[in-house]
Image (cartoon, rainbow, N blue to C red):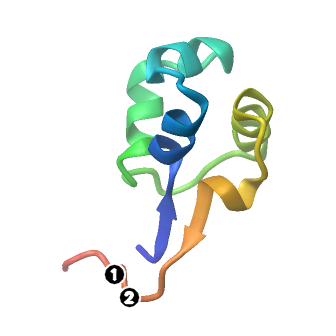
Amino acid sequence: MPIVVNIDVMLARRKMSAGELAERIALTPANLSILKNNKAKAVRFSTLEALCRALDCQPGDILEYAPGEEEPS
C-alpha cells in the first residue's frame, strides 16, 4: 500500500514507548501494532486525532504517501 504510517518515527522523536501511546489514546497494544506495522486497511479520524493529540503532531507527520510502496500480490 502506498500509504506509510510513521508512528515509530514520531514515538522516537517524542521519546515515548508504544505502550505509553496506546494507553494515552485508549487503543489496545495489538491495534497500535497493526497501525505501526502498516497492516491496517483503514484509520478512523477519531484515532488519527487522538494520535496527533498524544504525539503533538499533524496527520502528515504520521501518514506519508509513497507511490512505489505497493504490497506484493
- Indicate whether 6 appears above or below 35: below
Front residue (pair 32, 41): 32
Direction from residue 45 to residue 12 in the image, left or right: left
Tell me residue 68's x, y (percent): 38, 88
Front residue (pair 1, 61): 61
Mark 2: secondary structure = loop
Q: Residue 68 bears which disc, if any? A: 2
Mark 2 or 1: the one toward you: 2
Q: Residue placed at 47% from the left, 64% from the top? A: 4
Front residue (pair 12, 26): 12
Mark 1: secondary structure = loop
Tell me residue 10's x, y (percent): 57, 42
Tell me residue 59's x, y (percent): 74, 55
Direction from residue 53 to residue 27 in the image, left or right: left
Q: Quadrant of the C terminus?
A: bottom left
Q: Residue 24 bears which disc, if any? A: none
Q: Amino acid at mark 1?
A: Glu
Q: Residue placed at 73% from the left, 27% from the top? A: 54
Q: Amino acid at mark 2?
A: Gly
Q: Quadrant of the N terminus?
A: bottom left
Q: Residue placed at 70% from the left, 33% from the top? A: 55
Q: Residue placed at 47% from the left, 87% from the top? A: 67
Marks 2 & 1, CB-CB < 8 Å contact:
yes
Direction from residue 71 to residue 61 in the image, left or right: right
Residue at the left extreme? 73
Q: Residue 70 bears which disc, if any? A: 1
- Indicate whether 19 appears above or below 18: above
- Indicate whether 23 appears above or below 14: above
